[in-house]
Structures are given as C-alpha cells and as structure tokens.
Amino acid sequence: MKKKKWGFKKVDGGLEISNGGEGNKKWGIMLGLPYIGGSVGRYIRKRKKDLLKASASDPDGPLLRLENLVKIYDTGAIKVLGLKKINLTIGRGEFVAIMGHSGSGKSTLMNILGCLDRPTLGHYYLDGHDTASMTPDELSDIRNRKIGFVFQSFNLISRTSALKNVELPMTYARVPKAKRQQRAKELLERVGLGERLGHMPNEMSGGQRQRVAIARALANQPPLILADEPTGNLDTASSIEIMELFRELHQEGATVVVVTHEEDIAAFADRIIRFGDGQLLSDTINDHHQEEGETC
Ligand SMILES: Nc1ncnc2c1ncn2[C@@H]1O[C@H](COP(=O)(O)OP(=O)(O)O)[C@@H](O)[C@H]1O
Ligand SMILES: [Mg+2]
C-alpha cells in the first residue's frame, strides 16, 4: 500500500499541517491553534464539552462573581483603563440596574459579563466557571447556553423575518428545525408579537424590534439576561413596556441585569449599582419601585 506523505494543505483560514489525513489521526494547526481532526478530534471536543457541563457549579452559589476584575484597552499608543478592580456578586434571580455617566465602564462590564470580551486581570465566574481561562470556543459555547444579550440598537438581522431572527441562536445550538420554529413562534407570542412572525425588522417599530430581540435572547432558555441600554432608542411608552417585560421575566425566575442612565428605568429593578470612572461607586437596594402602570 502506498504510504501517505506529510504535507501542507490550504484550508479556510490558513494552512493546515497534515500527516496525510489518515482518518482519525489527522492533526495540524488551524487558524493558529492546534487542531485534531477525524473521530479522535470529535471525541476530544465532545469530552471537553461534557466536562464543562459536568463541572456545573454549586447551584446555591452566585450566578455571577467578579473578583478584582480589571479591563485595560490597549489602543497602541495609549492604554485605557476601562474597569478598575471590580468586586461584585449577583445572585440567581436578582433584577439589577447598572447606572453611570457615559464612559464610566458600563458597556465594558456588560461585554465581560456577556462573555463577549475577557478581563485583562482578575476573574469572572459565571455559574461557577472561571471565564478568564476559557478559549474563544468555550466562551461562545457558555454564552450561547447561559446568556441572552439585548443591545440598545436591537442588532436584528435585516431582511430576515422576526421568526428567523429568533430561531438563529437555536440554529447555532443545533436545535432541530421543527422544534426551533415552534419555540420561536411561542417566544414571539410571549412578547406580544404573535401577529408579526413574518415581519422584517424594518416593518416594525423600535419597541417591537426590541421585543423580537428579547425573544431571541430567550431562545436557548438562558438563566441570565443582560441588556445594555435596551430603552436607549425607544420612546417613553415603549420603554415602559420593555421594562415591564424584563420585570415579568425576572418574576419567572431569570436573573436580569439592565444598564441604563435613566433613573426611571433603573427604578424597575430591585438593586441599583452605580459606576463612575471604571469603579463601583454604590450598590443599593431599590425600595422605590416603579409601580405597574405608573408613567415615567
Ligand atoms: N474598544 C475600546 N477601545 C478603547 N477604549 C475603549 C473601548 N471601549 C471602551 N473604551 C473606553 O473605556 C471606557 C469605558 O467605556 P464604556 O464601557 O463604553 O462606557 P459606558 O458604557 O459607561 O459609556 C471609556 O473611557 C471608553 O473610551
Ligand atoms: Mg455604553
């Protein structure tokens, strides 16, 4: 039998060093990272995923814990200190508002909490998992399973129906087509858009788009919902509707963290954390709740 040769192969994203591609022994470097292909690679990746799931934390422990967390943006010539040694714990089922003036570090914090970015120093434990030591793959996996993120600018995919937008995270999570369509429909009904399943984002109002974004955030039933200025582009009436929706999700058991710079919006939450210049300034219980039906 002819012996296969070592060699380089052009693949998507770069060169792969290959031992000739002998089925389950194939290995190399892909996108600058070690890569093992074939059934051996599949086994290792599945085992890693199972271990991550199995190492699930103490269910009585906090959902989020930040320990001496520092974020430095290295822009070349200058380094910007985004967050300065933050220590913070958020428990399961809490409803928290994060406030602070522009540039105080709110989005930096939310991006780290949402596993969209990693701390420069310190630790962020999400459901007991230390995200500082995770690879980009592991971060995106934990993000898809544990976090629903809602943005100020909705971030929906244009020219794609509300239903398909909500289905998307379930496609990544490999939920079968019929099941994800059914769940997307139920979620859109849940946020009051049962009549708008086929509508494109540009056929909806800001408040309706944000409701699609919330339905999408709920797709994989994440225990944590993060929203960075979700009412920043909305009028007062829509802002109240969106905050009432977050309050209902919190009452159903979700942990909800909302960034806002408006006192009336923060008043919906049970706990208000204030940031200034990358530091935590205060952390208080809110006993002046925005009551149902009250106007902002
Ligand atoms: N990608 C980035 N590169 C460099 N500096 C950044 C970046 N993102 C944020 N910053 C800086 O970090 C600080 C905190 O910003 P940010 O978290 O966006 O504040 P906020 O959301 O409270 O307005 C600011 O000084 C900002 O200029
Ligand atoms: Mg911001």
Image (tube, rainbow, N blue to C red):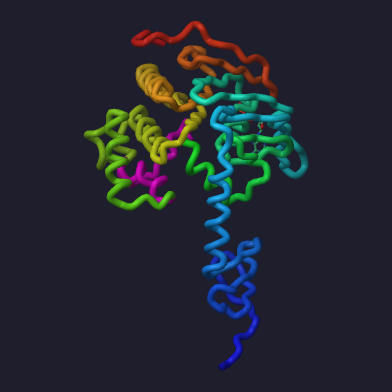
> Residue 88's spot in the image, x, y percent?
65, 24
To which quarter of the image does residue 47 belong?
A: bottom right
Asked whether residue 155 is drawn in magenta, I would say yes
As drawn, is 233 to the left or to the right of 82?
left
Which segment did they paint magenta? Answer: 149-172
Q: Is residue 101 visible?
A: yes
Taking the spot 41% from the left edge, 11% from the top edge, the residue there is 296
Q: Position of residue 237 (x, y in %)?
A: 35, 17
Asked if residue 129 is among those painted magenta in the image, a careful observer would answer: no
User: Is residue 170 shown above or below 285?
Assistant: below
Between 75 and 98, the residue placed more toward the observer is 98
Residue 15 in which image quadrant:
bottom right
The image position of residue 163, as x and y in percent, is 30, 42
Instruction: Point out the quarter of the image occupied by ligand 1.
Output: top right
- Above or below, comparing residue 54 to residue 279 in the picture: below
Nearer to the camera, 8 or 87: 87
